[in-house]
Image (cartoon, rainbow, N blue to C red):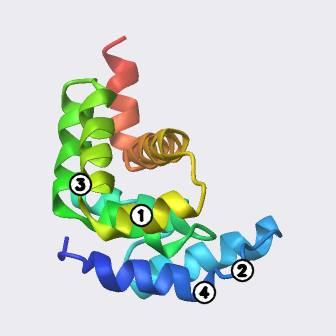
């Protein structure tokens, strides 16, 4: 999988998605268009962490404020997210997000938006898990069933 420029991805998401899109069908069309634009297969998400992360940014991010999506672009946040998943410990990610928001000017902008940070981080994680589940191939699913 090619490395995806998260800055370009976030710019594309927020450029299309303002103001918030209410019609689900239109939102899905935009998600599919963005995934194709970044060479991500809309039918089958990539299986590697970076690919699932980028795919999740698209699926989660349409309609979200750019300032908040910029947090997920940060390498420290991405790595904290991965570590939180590996250790099944969301507090790893939440504490890193809190530090980021308290340290950088972007944090002030996000705080003025009145975003419930913990809820949004949880929503992002939920989408990530769903995308990761969909990244399994039919062979992966069949192999799992054959071992049960």
Foreground mark, 1 or 2, reads: 1
Nearest the viewer among 79 and 114 is: 114
How far apart marks 1 and 3 lie (CA) works out to 20 Å
Q: Quadrant of residue 83?
A: top left
Mark number for residue 108? 1
Crowding near the residue tagged with mark 3, few <14, some 14–19, many ≥20 C-alpha atoms within 10 Å? some
Horizontal and vertical percent position of residue 35: 46, 76
Foreground mark, 1 or 4, reads: 1
At 58% from the left and 67% from the top, the residue drawn is 64
Mark number for residue 120? none
Whether the residues at callouts 1 and 3 have beta carbons within 8 Å, the answer is no
Q: Is residue 32 left or right of residue 11?
A: right
Whether the residues at callouts 1 and 4 have beta carbons within 8 Å, the answer is no
Q: Quadrant of residue 32?
A: bottom right
Foreground mark, 1 or 3, reads: 1
Above or below, 129 against 79 in this view is above
- Secondary element at tag 1: helix
Answer with mark 2 or mark 3, whichever residue precedes in sequence. Answer: 2
Crowding near the residue tagged with mark 2, few <14, some 14–19, many ≥20 C-alpha atoms within 10 Å? few
- Secondary element at tag 4: helix
In which quadrant of the rendered image does the C terminus lie?
top left
Whether the residues at callouts 2 and 3 have beta carbons within 8 Å, the answer is no
Nearest the viewer among 78 and 23 is: 78
Crowding near the residue tagged with mark 1, few <14, some 14–19, many ≥20 C-alpha atoms within 10 Å? few
- Secondary element at tag 2: loop
Residue under circle 2? Answer: 19
Answer with mark 3 or mark 4, whichever residue precedes in sequence. Answer: 4
Residue under circle 3? Answer: 78
């Amino acid at each position: 999988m090619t490395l995806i420029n998260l800055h370009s991805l976030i710019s594309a998401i927020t450029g299309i998605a303002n103001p918030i899109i209410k019609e689900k069908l239109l939102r899905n069309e935009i998600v599919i268009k963005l995934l194709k634009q970044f060479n991500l297969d809309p039918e089958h998400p990539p299986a590697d962490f970076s690919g699932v992360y980028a795919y999740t940014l698209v699926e989660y991010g349409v309609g979200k404020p750019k300032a908040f999506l910029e947090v997920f672009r940060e390498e420290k946040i991405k790595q904290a997210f991965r570590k939180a998943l590996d250790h099944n410990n969301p507090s790893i990610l939440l504490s890193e997000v809190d530090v980021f928001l308290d340290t950088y000017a972007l944090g002030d902008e996000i705080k003025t938006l009145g975003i419930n940070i913990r809820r949004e981080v949880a929503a992002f994680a939920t989408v990530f898990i769903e995308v990761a589940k969909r990244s399994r191939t039919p062979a992966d699913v069949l192999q799992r069933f054959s071992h049960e």
